[in-house]
Amino acid sequence: MTEKEKMLAGDLYLAFDGELVEERNQAKSLCYELNLLHPEEDLRAEVLAELLPNSLDPWIEPSFFCDYGYNITTGKNFYANHGCVILDGAPVTIGDDVMFAPAVHISTATHPLNAKQRTDGLERALPVSIGDRVWIGMGAKILPGVTIGDNAVVAAGAVVVKDVAANTVVAGVPAQYVRDVPEDEESA
């Protein structure tokens, strides 16, 4: 297996493999281009289409950074505010009508606890899945292997280390259940 195949399979892989470095550099070049566009230039959609070929017309404010881009899939009406970072060694799937506040970070990358494996350059990537109509608050961090259910709300500053049930609000470090999402505005 190539290092890329290992990465996509969730196995330990060498992150500094030539093919992966080249692909990250390509994504970083596109992020650079996106982040330097003048706000009135009408090129954002073109750059995002190249950077995120598996996404449905996302709206992403600069600055935005990702590792590969091709592992990110967004549904319709996805919005990410300034300072979003997605480390997408594994698939990151984002549903419809999802909103990210400023400085949301998602990482699929994780490193072995074994020091020798880490110093040898090995890492692993685990997928992240975010359902429909999810709101991720400012500065929240989503860690590898996490699934967030439909309609969930992740509070500002939360660090999500385990799955979040649909229709719930989580907050804190590590993120914990706070309450169910209200069914109507009167109970919000």
Image (tube, grey):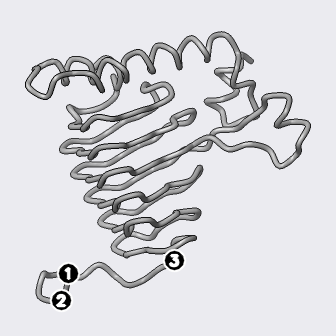
Closer to the observer: label 3 or label 1?
3
Residue at image location 30% in from the left, 31% down from the top: 55
Q: Can you identify the residue that label 2 sits on?
A: 187
Q: Is residue 46 left or right of residue 27?
A: left
Asked whether the residues under the numbered discs 3 and 1 touch, taking CB atoms below 8 Å apart as contact, a structural biologist would say no
Whichever of callouts 3 and 1 sits on the residue coming sooner in the sequence is 3
Q: Is residue 175 left or right of residue 140?
A: right
Closer to the observer: label 1 or label 2?
2
Asked whether the residues under the numbered discs 1 and 2 touch, taking CB atoms below 8 Å apart as contact, a structural biologist would say yes
Distance CA(mark 3)–CA(mark 1): 20 Å
Distance CA(mark 1)–CA(mark 2): 7 Å
Q: What is the three-letter code of the residue carrying label 1?
A: Glu
Q: Can you identify the residue that label 3 sits on?
A: 176
Residue 183 shows which numbered tag? 1
Q: Quadrant of the N terminus?
A: top right
Please identify the residue farthest to the bottom as the structure is shown. Answer: 187
Q: Is residue 98 left or right of residue 175?
A: left
Residue at image location 24% in from the left, 38% down from the top: 61
Residue 76 position by quadrant: top left
- Against 27, is 94 above or below? below
Q: Position of residue 49 (x, y in %)?
A: 27, 21
Distance CA(mark 3)–CA(mark 2): 21 Å
Residue 26 shows which numbered tag? none
Q: What is the three-letter code of the residue carrying label 3?
A: Gln
Whichever of callouts 3 and 2 sits on the residue coming sooner in the sequence is 3
